Amino acid sequence: MGIRIVIAGESQCNLFAEICLVADYLSQNLPIFCYESIEKPVAEWKPWLFKLNQNYKWHHIESPVVWKELLMTGSAPIYIGGASEFLEYIHSYYQFDVFIAPKRFDHLVDYSDQFQKKIKQEVQTEKKFSNSEYFERIEKTSYTVCISGAGNPLAMFLISGLLETFGKMRFSKIYLYDEVCSQRLMDFIENECNYIESDYSGKIVKYTEKIGVALTNSDLLILLNYVPFRSTYSIGDWLYKNKKLMESMAVKINATASQNMYIILPNLGPACYNATILANSLNKIDKNNIVVVTSDLGLDILPVAAEIAEVPLRNLFCPPVWGFVGINHLADIQTTFHKYNSFDPYDRHTKVRSSTLCIGTLTPEIRTMEYLMFFDERLWKTVADRKVSSSERKLSINKAVAVLNLVKIWLFDRNSNYIVNLGIKCDGSFGLNFKGYFSQPAQLVNGAWKPASHFILPRDPLMKISYLERMAEIVMNLKKTDLPQVAEYTPCICKVKVKINL
C-alpha cells in the first residue's frame, strides 16, 4: 500500500521552501517516497488553514503543515505536524539527516519560485516542440474512419473487415457518407453493418448526411467516390468528370478535415489520376498521407500464376504492380517472389538404401518466378477469361483485402520491412520523375509511404516502365474533348456465297 506526503504552506514561508527542497531530494533518490506540495498566497493561508483544522479536527497554527495519505479511495489524512515534526518523521522512517544553514538558504523562497517557474516553462516548451514525436511513440489503438461513397458494394466488405479482423486494434466510429444514394439505402446499410457479430458493445457504424461532421473527427478517409466509364463518354470527358468530382471532395476536406488525416483510394476508376488531382487540390494535408491501393491487381493474377507454375499459392508473394493504375498498369509476374525449400542430400544418400537416418537438409529460399513463367504465354489470356466469367463480388473481395491489409500495416502494425503495392508520389526512385501518383512497391518510413528503391525493376519483355510513365504524363494533359467516343464495331461473320459454274 503506498503513502503520499502532503506539504502545505504559505508562499513566503522559508520553512515551507526548505522542507519542500528536502522532500524533492527524497523523491528523486527514493522510489517509494511520494509527495505533493500545496502553496497558498499570504492572504489565503490563514482562512485555508482554519478550514483544514475544522475538517480534520486538528490544531495546527503556523506554516507549514504536513500530513500523509494512504493511496486508496476513502482514506483519511494522518497528521504529522510542522517542519520539525516532518524532519523527525523522515529520520525515523528513512534514516535521513539534514542540516540547513540559515545563511545559505536566506533566499530559498525566491529560488524555489524561480525553480518551479523554470520547470513549468520547460514542460510547456517540451510539449510545444515534442508533442508530435511523443504521440508517434505512443501506439494509438482506436481510430475513427469515414467511408465516402458508401453506396458502393465494396463498402460492405470493408466495414465487415474493419469490424472483424483487427482484434485488440479497434475503431471508435465508422462514418458512412454518400451524396448520391438515398437516405433509405444508407440507413439500411447502417443497420445491416451494426448487426455484424463483433467484440464492439455499442453502435459503431453511423450514417451521416453531412460529411463535414465525419471529417472533423476522422483519422482515416476511405474514398470510394469515382465516375465509372461508359461507352457514351470520350476518354477526355470521363477524366474531366472524375477531375470535377475530386476537386469537389477536396473543397470539403480542406474545410473540415484534420491535417493529419490519412486518405486511401481503392483501385476504382482512374485511381492514380484521381489521387493526383485530389493531392493537387488539397492545401493542408500532407501528400504522403494520400495513397492508392493497387495490390488487388496482383492478387487477381496470383491464382492463375500458381496453377500454371504448379506451385502452392501460399508460397507466392503478391506480384509488384507498376503504372498509372486506372489507365494502364503492369503486374509483373517475372519479379514475383516464390518461397520454396532447397534439398541438399548427404553423401550417404547415394550409398545407403533403406536408412532411417536423415538423408539431407531442407533450406528455405526465395527466388523470382521468372524461371517458371518466362516461356509461358497463357497467363494474361487466362486472367482475362476469368475476369469475364467472374462476378463483381469476387473482384470486390480482392480490393477489400488489399485495403484492409494496408489499414492494418499503416495504422496498427507499422513495420518498415513490409513492401506494399501503392500509388504514391514519385521521388525519382526507379527513374520515375512523374509529378503525380504512380503505382510502385512502397515501404513505410517514419510513418510515410516511400518508394522501396531497393526493389527489382520490372522484367516483363513486352512492357517497359518508361512507357507507363510517358502514358501517365500524356493522360494528365488530356483535355475534355480529347480521345473521342469509341464507336463499337462488330464485323460481319456471314459466309460469302460463291457461285460455281459447271
Image (tube, rainbow, N blue to C red):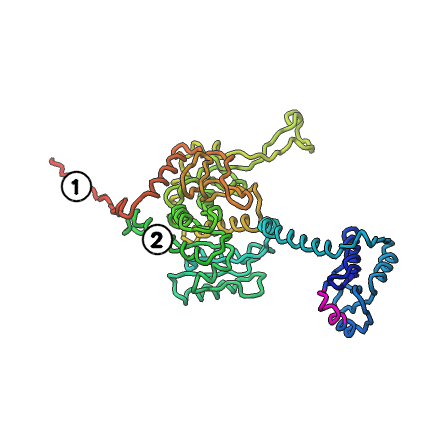
Give the SS element for disc 2.
helix
Residue 212 on image: x %, y %: 45, 61
Image quadrant containing the C terminus: top left
Residue 158 on image: x %, y %: 48, 55
Question: Is 44 colored magenta in this rendering?
Answer: yes
- What predominant SS class does the magenta segment belong to? helix
Q: Is residue 249 above or below residue 276?
A: below
Which residues are drawn in magenta? 40-49
Question: Is 215 colored magenta in this rendering?
Answer: no
Q: Amino acid at mark 2?
A: Lys
In this rendering, the label closer to the viewer, 2 or 1: 2
Label 2 environment density (alpha carbons within 10 Å; few <14, some 14–19, many ≥20): some
Q: Nearer the viewer, residue 183 or 191?
A: 183
Q: Are marks 2 and 1 in contact (CB under 8 Å)?
A: no
Say left or right for 474 vs 300: left
User: Residue 120, which numbered label?
Assistant: none
Q: Amino acid at mark 1?
A: Lys
Number of numbered markers: 2
Give the SS element for disc 1.
loop
Say left or right for 445 vs 355: left
User: Residue 497, which numbered label?
Assistant: 1
Say left or right for 241 vs 427: left
Q: Earlier in the sequence, mark 2 or mark 1?
A: 2
Residue 281 on image: x %, y %: 40, 50
Which residue position holds label 2? 244
